[in-house]
Each structure stands twice: as structure tokens, then as C-alpha cells.
């Protein structure tokens, strides 16, 4: 059955998404090509991302790459941001959302060349005038649109001189927080096709565990080039989808 391919789609997308964000660039179009209804495809992504992102966060927590004390405050900030974004999305047109996504990703891409953040630092994420508004703003973006959320967060953490492996852990926890609320919404609305969602989830968990193991060994100097490639791919995908609609 062709839907078995969802396992591999989830594994590949989440491996890339763990390392540099942008996993939705692979999973969502692939699911739509398989003929899965859009709401069910998005819902499956939210459910699988909730579980897989938390599993990768737990891996890093267990291996003492990150602590709960330093990162717990990310949960309410990202959750409130996601709720805010979902509310704003109901007031904006789809065309305006596409434009906003392109502007934000283009801004992140440009600043990656002029910013000094390179993930070589050893800083932990702290409550500050940059970190809280930054995380809240990206949470709003995730609620508004979604694809590229992890990529934008990695740019933010690079700017804050957070060590790469810690940044990955923070992104996975924030992704868990924002996807959790969305997943509940899709489940309550009856949009989840459970056999397909479970296959995607199993693949995503595999990809998440693969991704964090690669992240532990990935040299910081390679992170920004990967981020830039993912960012350009996200922008091109959004433009093509907008033209196609």
C-alpha cells in the first residue's frame, strides 16, 4: 500500500527538520500528492510533530545537553504565541499569510549573512528583551502559517549565541508546545485519519532520534549553510504554492 511510504516521509522530513527546520517542506506536499485531504494532512503533521519533537527533546534532556530548568519557560511563551497566531490567522486572507511568510523568511536569510551568530557560543537561553519577544513572535508565525518556524528559531538562537545542540533542544520543545494545541484542535474537529497519522508519527519519531544524534556530531560551521539552503527552499515552495493558487 502506497501509504506505507508515509513512514519514510516522516523519517526523512523530521531528520531534516530537527537539524535545520523546514521538515514540513517535505512532509506536507508529499502527503497532498498521495491524495490525503489538506486538513487531515496538516492534522497528521501536528500530531506526529507533537510526539516526535518531545521525544527528541527528552533524548537531549537525558544526555544532559539541556536542562528543564533553563528551558521550561519556553512552553508557555510558544503556546501563547501559537494561540495568538491562530486567532490572527482567522482575520487575515491566505494571500496576506503567504506574503508575511516570504517577508519573514527573506529577512532571516539576509540577516544570516550580516549577523554574528554562528552557534559556536556556549550560552544558554535566558529570559531577555530579545528571547521572549522573539519566541513569542515565532510562535505567532507558527500559529499563522507554520512552515519555517523551526528555521526561524534557529536563526534567533544563533543570534543569541546559543550552542547549536542546545538550540536544537529549545526548538524541539517549542515545536512540541505549539503543535500540541493545534493537534488537540484537529483531533476535536475529527480531521485525523488515524492509520495514516500513526504511520507518519512512527516515521517522525525515527527521524527525530536520527536528527538529534546527527546534531550532536554536527560542527557549528556547517549549520548556517544548511539553514540557508532550507530557507531558500521554503521561500521557493511558498512562492510556487501562491502562484498555483
Image (cartoon, rainbow, N blue to C red):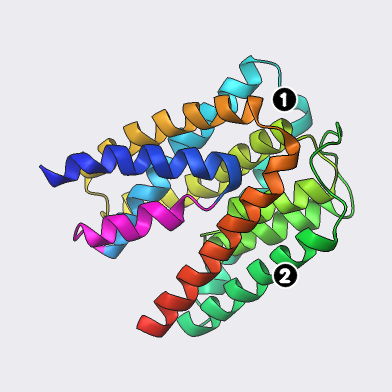
Image position, residue 176 (x, y; %): 54, 41
Q: Name the residue located 57 percent from the left edge and 28 percent from the top edge.
A: 214
Disc 1 residue crowd, few under 14, some 14–19, many 20+, Cα 10 Å: many
The residue under label 1 is 66
Q: Secondary structure at mark 2?
A: helix
Disc 2 residue crowd, few under 14, some 14–19, many 20+, Cα 10 Å: few
Left or right, 87 with respect to 219, comes to: left
Image position, residue 193 (x, y; %): 22, 48
Q: Main secondary structure of the magenta part?
A: helix
Q: Which residues are magenta?
A: 22-37
Rounded to the nearest angstrom, the CA distance separating label 1 from label 2 is: 29 Å
Q: Is residue 33 magenta?
A: yes
Q: Name the residue located 53 percent from the left edge and 77 percent from the top edge.
A: 97
The residue under label 2 is 107
Q: Secondary structure at mark 1?
A: loop
Q: Quadrant of the N terminus?
A: top left
Q: Name the residue located 48 percent from the left edge and 38 percent from the top edge.
A: 15
- From the viewer's perspective, is the residue at label 1 or at label 2 nearer? 2
Q: Is residue 138 magenta?
A: no
Amino acid at each position: 500500500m502506497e501509504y506505507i511510504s508515509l513512514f519514510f516521509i516522516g523519517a526523512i522530513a523530521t531528520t531534516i527538520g530537527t537539524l535545520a527546520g523546514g521538515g514540513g517542506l517535505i512532509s506536507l506536499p508529499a502527503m497532498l500528492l498521495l491524495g490525503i485531504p489538506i486538513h487531515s494532512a496538516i492534522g497528521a503533521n501536528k500530531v506526529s510533530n507533537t510526539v516526535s519533537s518531545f521525544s527528541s527533546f527528552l533524548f537531549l534532556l537525558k544526555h544532559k545537553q539541556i536542562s528543564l530548568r533553563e528551558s521550561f519557560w519556553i512552553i508557555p511563551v510558544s503556546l501563547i504565541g501559537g494561540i495568538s497566531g491562530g486567532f490572527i490567522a482567522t482575520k487575515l486572507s491566505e494571500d496576506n499569510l503567504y506574503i508575511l511568510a516570504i517577508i519573514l523568511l527573506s529577512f532571516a536569510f539576509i540577516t544570516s549573512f550580516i549577523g554574528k551568530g554562528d552557534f559556536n557560543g556556549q550560552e544558554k537561553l535566558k529570559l531577555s528583551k530579545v528571547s521572549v519577544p522573539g519566541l513569542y513572535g515565532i510562535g505567532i508565525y507558527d500559529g499563522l502559517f507554520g512552515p519555517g518556524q523551526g528555521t526561524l528559531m534557529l536563526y534567533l538562537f544563533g543570534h543569541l549565541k546559543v550552542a547549536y545542540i542546545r538550540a536544537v533542544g529549545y526548538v524541539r520543545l517549542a515545536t512540541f508546545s505549539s503543535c500540541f494545541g493545534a493537534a488537540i484542535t484537529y483531533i476535536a474537529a475529527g480531521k485525523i485519519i488515524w492509520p495514516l497519522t500513526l504511520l507518519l508519527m512512527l516515521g517522525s519519531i525515527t527521524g527525530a532520534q536520527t536528527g538529534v544524534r546527527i546534531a550532536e556530531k554536527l560542527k557549528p560551521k556547517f549549520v548556517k549553510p544548511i539553514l540557508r539552503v532550507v530557507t531558500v527552499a521554503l521561500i521557493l515552495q511558498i512562492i510556487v504554492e501562491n502562484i498555483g493558487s
